[in-house]
Image: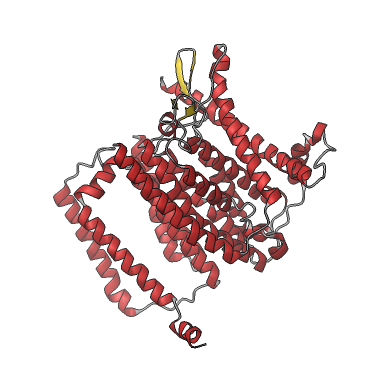
Amino acid sequence: MNITAFVIVSIIKTVLALFVLLTAVAYTVWLERKVVGHMQNRWGPTRVGPFGLLQPLADGVKFLFKEDLTPPHVYKPLYIAAPMIAVVFALTSIAVVPFGNWVKIDGLHIPLQITDVNIGLLIILGVTSLGVYGVALAGWSSNSKYSLLGGLRASAQMISYEISLGLSLVGVLMLAGSLSLRDIVDAQSGLFWGFIPKWNIFYGGQFVAFFIYLMSAYAETNRIPFDLPEAETELVAGYHTEYSAMKFAMFFMAEYANMITVAAVASLLFLGGWHGPVFGPPLVRALLPVFWFALRIFGFLFVYIWVRGTLPRFRYDQLMAFGWKFLLPLAIANLVITAFIVAIRA
Amino acid sequence: MLHLILFLAFGAVCVAGAINLLVQRHPINGALSLVAVMGSLAVEYLLLGAEFVAAVQVIVYAGAIMVLFVFVIMLLNAGVEEQTKGSRVALLFGVPGMLLGSILIGWVLLAKGGDASVPVGAMPGAPKVIGWLLFHDFLLPFEVTSILVLIAIMGAVVLASHPDADQGKKES
């Protein structure tokens, strides 16, 4: 591939991935309102468009045209920078997520991924670990006690759960022997015993790791039951109490984009990525893996919403005890056992 | 050529961040300048082909240690630092000492290393190579370091615990 074709293809892929991600973010909000509504015996949004499908557009217009208030007591440079930091890091991690196999267009072999790097997973971990600055700085620069408490809770919680999150992924890395997300997915192709797919959650025995990852991911994205940084009953709205209009919407976008990234990583690492039955004419063959991958992400997002509709919020000491005294030892035990399995197989 | 431009640009960001760290009077701005320094250092590692070290630099330093710094600054709600007129000892010994040190380092680098720079990608960068070096060639230093870290953790636990409060619990 020459350099011009590479640049053009990269730009097209980036624009497409960002467009799909942002649309998915908007419609995840719609899905959440709709599903939680039905779970609570309500209708959710119904007024704007059929089934309220145009609600995200109406929300977007509203966010753009609302008055952008800046309270007089904030520390301005960081107050303005914080939502940008949050949203930038949330959107960056999509760059290394592969969403399908290779496609061949006009003699060009194009990977369905913005960029394939051999430390893809580490980049995602690094970028998401920087995302905490957005929340922490928003809490601090708002100069209000609710925001500060929310920011403190968020940083303490995210640092605590990042450890078990990282450790739960190491088992998968040992099985695949690579940090490249594409290699990890390729290692999960095929079947064993004739009918069970070789996904890490079944074949590698990473069942426990999968649940550790899932729970830590809920905590990392500040979702119920771990949404103490924005606990409405105690902290008004937590770290984004003092934000309005588009700045508030940026935190919202960051949270939902992070949810999607976390769901994508879970699908790639534990559920075989884009593997699934592939059939039909060439175009369908090319697009089916992407569809299977999107279906997995949708499943994760639905579970997120389901959990939100089901569980109450943890108390703060319960949150810390659960992270440090239960998830972390469990993740270490899983790591040691997986290491033994890998050593015996080798 | 592009590599050299990027290397110089991020080197400049790194130095600017370090100077900003000293100039800024508010602790949180200082901490954020340090994050910028670490981020640009990570890019420099990446440009040298050490992608694993770059990723670890971001995850460990920028993503964990500096977050804790910011956390503590937020927790203590540290205000603007007071500035003294500066100590005379620092002026008399510090500045000449720093100049002497940098001249010494520069001289050693130029005299011993020659002017041939390391080609891009020549350093061990892949995770497998790093792992082999860490757990095979440098196993003893690695384990000694881990014991050092363990001692530091134990020290932190001792400092953070309140022995008086524990005794009070036992008596009651």
Which residue shows up at 73% across the image and 52% down it? A68
Check the image and report above or below for A21 versus A101: below
Q: Which of A307 and A48 is in front in this view?
A: A307
| Relative image position of residue A136 (x, y in whole percent) | 56, 59
Q: Which of B41 and A228 is in front in this view?
A: A228
Most extreme residue toward the right is A47
Check the image and report above or below for B48 versus B110: above
Q: Nearer the viewer, residue A22 or A211?
A: A211
Asked if residue A337 lies left or right of residue A126, the reply is left
Q: Quadrant of the N terminus of chain B?
A: top left
Most extreme residue toward the front is A193
Q: How many marks?
A: 0
| Relative image position of residue B108 (x, y in whole percent) | 17, 55
* Colour setup of the view: secondary structure
Most extreme residue toward the left is B112
Determine if residue B24 is in view.
yes
Determine if residue A75 is in view.
no
| Relative image position of residue A197 (x, y in whole percent) | 48, 29
Q: Nearer the viewer, residue A346 or A19?
A: A346
| Relative image position of residue B150 (x, y in whole percent) | 33, 65
Check the image and report above or below for A195 versus B27: above
Which residue shows up at 21% across the image and 52% down it? B138
Which residue shows up at 44% across the image and 35% down it? A203
